[in-house]
Amino acid sequence: MPDFKQYYLLNATPHDVYLALTHKPTIMLWTGDKAEMKAEPDTEFSLWDGSIVGRNIEFTEGKKIVQHWYFGDIKPDSIVTIKLHEHNKGTSAELVHTNIPEDDFDEIVDGWNNYYFGALQDFYEEE
């Protein structure tokens, strides 16, 4: 199964981006949809009213998020790792999404670029 790696520049501090990715009310602001999230390992999460679901694995405040994204019973696990790095324009978000089901790859990449990080970029540009 293919992997996807990409960097995204966000006009906000790593601390603010981390909160936007882990704090339920802020997630709902930039997605415009229902979300369930706790920044605690071994908790379930749901974004875009259940369009994305999984389990939180690891958090390093302001720096790193690791999640298991569910794609039914497909193995090996699909793992999302987001690392936040200070950048002179705010934050460089390093995304690595491993083991994406081949049939879903193009849709997942489009989602990352246009709806997930694209929406975050728009959110921080409007502030």
Image (cartoon, rainbow, N blue to C red):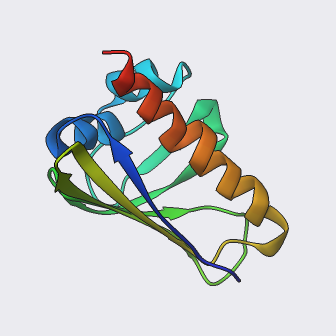
x, y percent for residue 107: 76, 54
Quarter occupied by residue 41? bottom left
Q: Nearer the viewer, residue 17 or 34?
A: 17
Would residue 14 be found to the left or right of residue 114 on screen? left
x, y percent for residue 94: 36, 63
Counting labels gives: 0
Q: Nearer the viewer, residue 90 or 54?
A: 90
- In the rendered view, tell whether residue 74 sits above or below residue 21: below
Residue with the most extreme front position: 88
x, y percent for residue 19: 24, 36
Please identify the quadrant where the C terminus is shown: top left
Would residue 25 be found to the left or right of residue 18 on screen? right
Q: Nearer the viewer, residue 16 or 91?
A: 91
Would residue 79 be found to the left or right of residue 91 on screen? right
- In the rendered view, tell whether residue 98 sits above or below residue 64: below
Residue with the most extreme right position: 103
x, y percent for residue 103: 85, 68
- In the rendered view, tell whether residue 65 sits above or below residue 116: below
Quarter occupied by residue 100? bottom right
Residue at x-position 62% and y-position 61%: 70
Please identify the quadrant where the N terminus is shown: bottom right
Quarter occupied by residue 23? top left
Residue at x-position 60% and y-position 77%: 3
